[in-house]
């Protein structure tokens, strides 16, 4: 192993050759440096692997949230956190307050006017015409429709409890109950609500959920207003359905006229509670 051919692979003329030879003649020192280098390399590798795993997890989580957080139309995100609770003012023992809150729910903002181009871009079918801009159709925001249904069911139950005549038809009440049933099944909320050892049946206490902002939905509705407002007494003589669309906010740019002639029957199929006369 100490032949001239073998030494030729390690040695070189001049200072570099001498340096290489010195390293060859100190195997103990080389072994120590080699072990230390391996440990450093292994440490760097482990740190790099950990960072890569964290990055991958963060990326997958961000991708999941990105696919879940934005609604397709108003681009609402689940950026509001709220706890599960048992009682709110809407289920208060103060029945006068409770009734007032439910009756005060206003869903007029549900009616929006969206351009045909926007509707086409979002795969929506063309809707009946908005009186003050024939390039736009009338739409009902679904969240408001569900809120309208809850209000209607509450009013019906409240009237029954007090023993007064029903102002809502059973047909409409059952329709709203079915609409809410289908919404719950559609959402398929898989949140596990923790139970507690207590006489009252409750679950989910101290847990939180992430919600979309209703205020942002109202902002979207306002930006696309259909100038709608339900009259206090829709049965009064002289009131027309067209007059409900004459409440355009300042700066809307719409010109309201009294001689509008609809090409289709106005307000067909829109929610009774906020738009049509009582059934």
Image: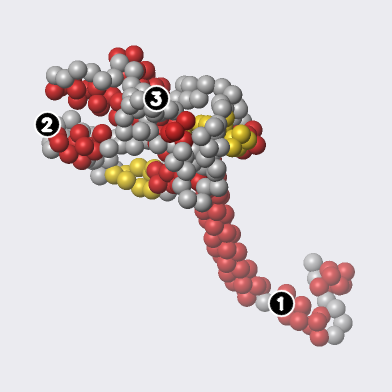
Asked whether the beta carbons under mark 3 and mark 1 sit within 8 Å of each other, the answer is no
* Mark carried by residue 23: 1
Between 14 and 212, the one lying in front of the other is: 212
Q: Residues within 10 Å of mark 1 (few under 14, many from 20)?
A: few
107 relative to 184, above or below: below
Visible residue check, residue 174: no
Residue to which mark 2 is pinned: 199
Q: Which quarter of the rendering shows the C terminus?
A: top left
Q: Identify the image quadrant of residue 47.
A: bottom right
Q: x%, y% of residue 213? A: 41, 45
Question: Which residue is outermost to the bottom?
Answer: 15
100 relative to 168, above or below: below
Q: Please report the residue visible at 30 percent of the width from the left and 36 percent of the height from the top.
A: 105
Q: x%, y% of residue 144? A: 40, 34
126 relative to 35, above or below: above
* Mark carried by residue 276: 3
- Foreground mark, 2 or 3? 3
Question: Which residue is outermost to the top?
Answer: 171
């Amino acid at each position: 192993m100490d032949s001239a051919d073998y030494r030729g692979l390690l040695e070189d003329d001049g200072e570099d050759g001498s340096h290489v030879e010195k390293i060859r003649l100190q195997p103990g020192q080389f072994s120590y440096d080699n072990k230390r280098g391996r440990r450093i390399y292994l440490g760097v590798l482990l740190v790099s692997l950990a960072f890569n795993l964290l990055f991958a997890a963060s990326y997958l989580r961000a991708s999941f949230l990105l696919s879940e957080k934005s609604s397709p139309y108003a681009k609402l995100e689940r950026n509001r956190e709220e706890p599960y609770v048992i009682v709110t003012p809407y289920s208060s023992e103060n029945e006068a307050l409770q009734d007032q809150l439910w009756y005060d729910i206003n869903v007029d903002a549900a009616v929006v006017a969206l351009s045909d181009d926007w509707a086409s871009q979002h795969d929506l079918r063309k809707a009946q015409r908005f009186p003050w801009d024939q390039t736009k159709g009338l739409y009902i925001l679904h969240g408001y429709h569900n809120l309208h249904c809850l209000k209607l069911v509450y009013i019906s139950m409240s009237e029954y409890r007090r023993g007064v005549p029903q102002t809502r038809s059973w047909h409409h009440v059952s329709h709203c109950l079915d609409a809410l049933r289908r919404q719950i099944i559609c959402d398929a909320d898989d949140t596990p609500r923790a139970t507690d050892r207590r006489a009252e049946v409750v679950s989910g206490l101290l847990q939180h959920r992430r919600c979309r902002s209703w205020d942002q939905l109202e902002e979207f509705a306002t930006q696309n207003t259909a100038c709608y407002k339900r009259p206090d007494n829709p049965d009064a003589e002289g009131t027309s359905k067209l007059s409900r669309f004459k409440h355009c906010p300042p700066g809307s740019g719409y010109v309201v006229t009294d001689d509008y002639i609809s090409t289709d029957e106005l307000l067909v199929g829109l929610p009774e509670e906020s738009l049509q006369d009582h059934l």
